Image (cartoon, rainbow, N blue to C red):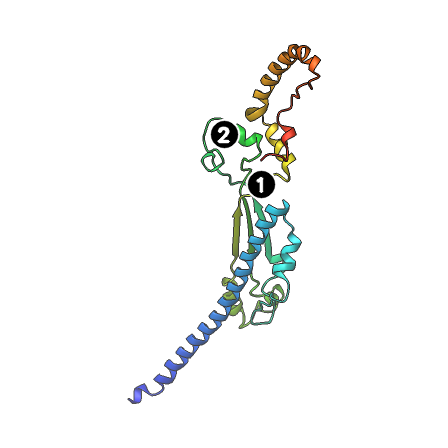
Amino acid sequence: MRNQQGQAMAEGLVVLLCLLTFFSAITWLGRLQDIALYEQHASRFGAFELARAANLDHAKFSSRFVHGHHATWRNRQGNALVADESVHVTLNRQARLDSAGQPGATERNATQLRKEWKVQDNGIANVAMTIRPLVVPQAAHAQNASGLAAHAVSFTENLALFLRRHTAILIGASHATDARSAHDRAAGSDTAWRRVARASYAAGKQISAVASRVDAPWQRTDPVFDWFMPWAGKKP
């Protein structure tokens, strides 16, 4: 028993050190999760903003998600964890749907119709936001480069990580702003309308040239060779 005197105190100090480490890690992890949550919201906002306005306003990211009353993320020294230079927003539209995932799939003439009706996927919009929390500010690096704090600085540097969240969304579903624009797009399709319409118009004009002489005594109006656009806004 004499050889074991003080062992419980030593074990208690080890356990206390572990508990303090866990408590510190929990608060640190909570801050990172909160940053990642706002980062996810920012990527979703960017994706839908791109779909709505066709551009990505980086200033809105900083004012709405990086700065503000909610952005109170601090490290143990009281310094901000997120700075402007540690936030990066990227837009990538290289990924595209294959033919099977687009309107009409792989049916005959579907590829050409997608181009003429402007419903073909031009690339999935992938908005990504990357944040590197500033564990130790640059000024502190110079101050702690030597001495007993060097080990602590090295440890915190190893904890530095990158938080990345992204949102992918299909944009440009070819919605028409009004009935006129919808008719313009449909009438401009060579495969779906103009090719057949030209042949019909040519035959109709030949018939009209002969029939107009017979219809002249009855003062009938000449036929209109635009069988599409006059219906704009009247029929879906």
Q: Who is closer to the viewer here, 221 or 109?
A: 221
Coordinates of residue 209 in the picture (x, y in percent): 66, 11
Q: Determine contact: label 1, label 2, CB under 8 Å.
A: no
Q: Residue at x 55, y 54 (%)?
A: 130
Where 216 sits versus 179, above or below? above
Q: Residue at x 35, y 84 (%)?
A: 8
Q: Which element type, helix, strand or loop, lies under badge 1?
A: loop
Q: Who is closer to the viewer here, 219 or 113?
A: 219
Q: Residue at x 50, y 26 (%)?
A: 109
Coordinates of residue 38 in the picture (x, y in percent): 56, 60
Where 201 sits versus 85, above or below? above
Q: Is the residue marked by circle 2 packed among few (<14), some (14-19), or many (20+) residues within 10 Å?
A: some
What amino acid is labelled 1 in the image? Gly
Q: Residue at x 45, y 31 (%)?
A: 106
| Residue where numbered disc 1 is placed | 172
Coordinates of residue 134 in the picture (x, y in percent): 57, 63
The quarter in which the C terminus is drawn is top right
Q: Which element type, helix, strand or loop, lies under badge 2?
A: helix
Residue reaching furthest left? 1
101 on left or right of 171:
left
Q: Let me know if residue 67 appears in the view.
A: yes
Coordinates of residue 91 in the picture (x, y in percent): 58, 46
Q: Who is closer to the viewer here, 78 or 211?
A: 211
Q: Earlier in the sequence, mark 1 or mark 2?
A: 2
184 on left or right of 170:
right
Residue 110 shows which numbered tag?
Answer: 2
Where 162 sits versus 225, above or below? below
* Residue 178 lies in quadrant: top right
The quarter in which the N terminus is drawn is bottom left
